[in-house]
Amino acid sequence: MSDAGTARPVLRLVRGTATPEELAAVVAVLAARSGGEVEHEEAAPRSQWGAPQLRRPLPPPGPGVWQASALRT
């Protein structure tokens, strides 16, 4: 565990010199982007196009099956 005095900084200025106003602007933008609370959006309805329960079973192997598989209703 680390003490509060030895905690690593969240942001670090790598190059250049920033004024306190510039740093405040960066922190404000990052805080706004984080969003805080997450809104749970309603999920879009799923397409049933490829649903396994809608597929018909394959006919048993045998002569003429390829025709039967194409002509099934």
Image (spheres, rainbow, N blue to C red):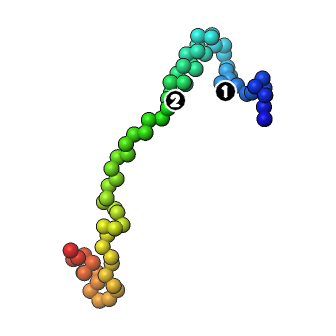
At x 73%, y 27%, the residue is: 8
Q: Nearer the viewer, mark 1 or mark 2?
A: 2
Residue 13 occupies which quadrant of the picture?
A: top right
Q: Farthest residue in the bottom direction?
A: 63
At x 58%, y 15%, the residue is: 24
How crowded pointer 2 is (Cα within 10 Å; few <14, some 14-19, many 20+) is rated as few
Residue 49 sits above or below residue 40 on the image: below
Residue matched to label 1:
10
In the displayed structure, does residue 60 sit left or right of residue 10?
A: left
What amino acid is labelled 1 in the image? Val
Q: Nearer the viewer, residue 4 or 46?
A: 4
Residue 43 sits above or below residue 4 on the image: below
What amino acid is labelled 2 in the image? Gly
Q: Nearer the viewer, residue 18 or 43?
A: 43
Q: CA distance from mark 1 to mark 2?
A: 17 Å
- Quarter of the picture containing the C terminus is bottom left
At x 75%, y 25%, the residue is: 4
Residue 54 sits above or below residue 8 on the image: below
**Where is residue 42 shown, x and y percent of the image?**
37, 42
**Where is residue 58 shown, x and y percent of the image?**
33, 78
Residue matched to label 2:
36
Q: Nearer the viewer, residue 9 or 39?
A: 39
Kind of element beneath mark 1: loop
In the displayed structure, does residue 61 sit left or right of residue 6?
A: left
**Where is residue 12 shown, x and y percent of the image?**
68, 23
Kind of element beneath mark 2: loop
At x 55%, y 25%, the residue is: 30
